[in-house]
């Protein structure tokens, strides 16, 4: 009897152990779904970090211009008012200063609220803006009405090659931008009013440049939380 039972058990196939989530599934859960218009950027996970590598040709997002609507992004659905934050650090090309010391190539990475290529705001750490070797930039493009604030002063304390945190808060048509060196103490940097987003929005991360050398941006601690407090 026991021998017969053992023989039956030996012939019974063992159900496979369920596989864990794929890297693509983990990436979408932690950060969002990759968007790579030119199909030449790489997205990978390093533990719980997202690494985006942009190759050696311009990849940017500039108010729907066909030449510069190809910045790599990861996006997730967003609705209502919310607060998004992320830790970011960039590995930039070693030499971005042409003769004369004026920086012309723009390298940036950070948060994006994306209705379309002509309806978005971006809150980025930047390098290479002419006259500002290190800065923060708040950009918006809404119905071809563009606005950019490249911030020196306090913004120069946030070098893109050193880890820091960016925080973006959307309250209806008001967008507020903050930064932090430790993810705990936040410094209000600027805000933009009358940002009329499309009804369907996504929020996420992007990396972009308009130079001839590629770079890598690493993101972690990405969170998106709905706002429950009364409007200020």
Image (cartoon, helix red, strand yellow):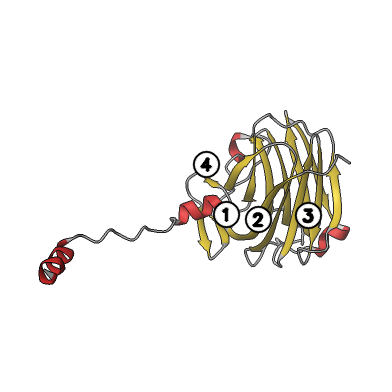
The answer to whether one can see residue 128 in this image is no
Callout 1–callout 2 Cβ contact below 8 Å: yes
N-term mark: 3 or 2: 3
Which SS class for mark 2? strand
Res. 30 mark: 1
N-term mark: 1 or 3: 1
Res. 37 mark: 4
Q: Nearer the viewer, mark 2 or mark 4?
A: 2
N-term mark: 3 or 4: 4
N-term mark: 1 or 2: 1
The answer to whether one can see residue 111 in this image is yes
Q: Report which quarter residue 217 is drawn in.
A: bottom right
Q: In the image, is residue 209 above or below residue 175?
A: below
| Residue positioned 68% across, 37% down in the render | 79
Which SS class for mark 4? loop
Q: Residue 26 at x, y = what percent?
A: 50, 55
Which SS class for mark 1? helix
């Amino acid at each position: 009897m026991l021998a017969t039972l053992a023989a039956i058990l030996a012939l019974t196939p063992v159900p496979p152990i369920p596989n864990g989530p794929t890297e693509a599934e983990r990436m979408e859960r932690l950060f969002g779904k990759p968007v790579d218009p030119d199909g030449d950027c790489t997205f990978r996970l390093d533990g719980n970090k997202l690494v985006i590598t942009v190759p050696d040709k311009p990849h940017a997002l500039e108010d729907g211009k066909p030449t510069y609507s190809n910045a790599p992004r990861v996006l997730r659905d967003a609705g209502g008012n919310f607060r998004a934050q992320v830790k970011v650090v960039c590995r930039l090309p070693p030499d971005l200063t042409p003769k004369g010391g004026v920086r012309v190539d723009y390298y940036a990475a950070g948060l994006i609220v994306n209705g379309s290529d002509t309806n978005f705001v971006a809150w980025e750490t930047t390098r290479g803006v002419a006259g500002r070797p290190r800065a923060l930039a708040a950009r918006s493009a809404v119905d071809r009405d563009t606005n950019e604030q490249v911030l020196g002063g306090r913004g120069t304390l946030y070098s893109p090659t050193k880890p820091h945190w960016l925080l973006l808060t959307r309250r209806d048509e008001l967008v507020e931008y903050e930064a932090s060196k430790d993810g705990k103490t936040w410094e209000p940097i600027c805000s933009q009013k009358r940002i009329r987003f499309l009804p369907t929005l996504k929020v996420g991360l992007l990396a972009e440049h308009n130079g001839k050398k590629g770079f890598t941006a690493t993101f972690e601690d990405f969170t998106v939380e709905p706002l429950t407090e009364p409007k200020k």
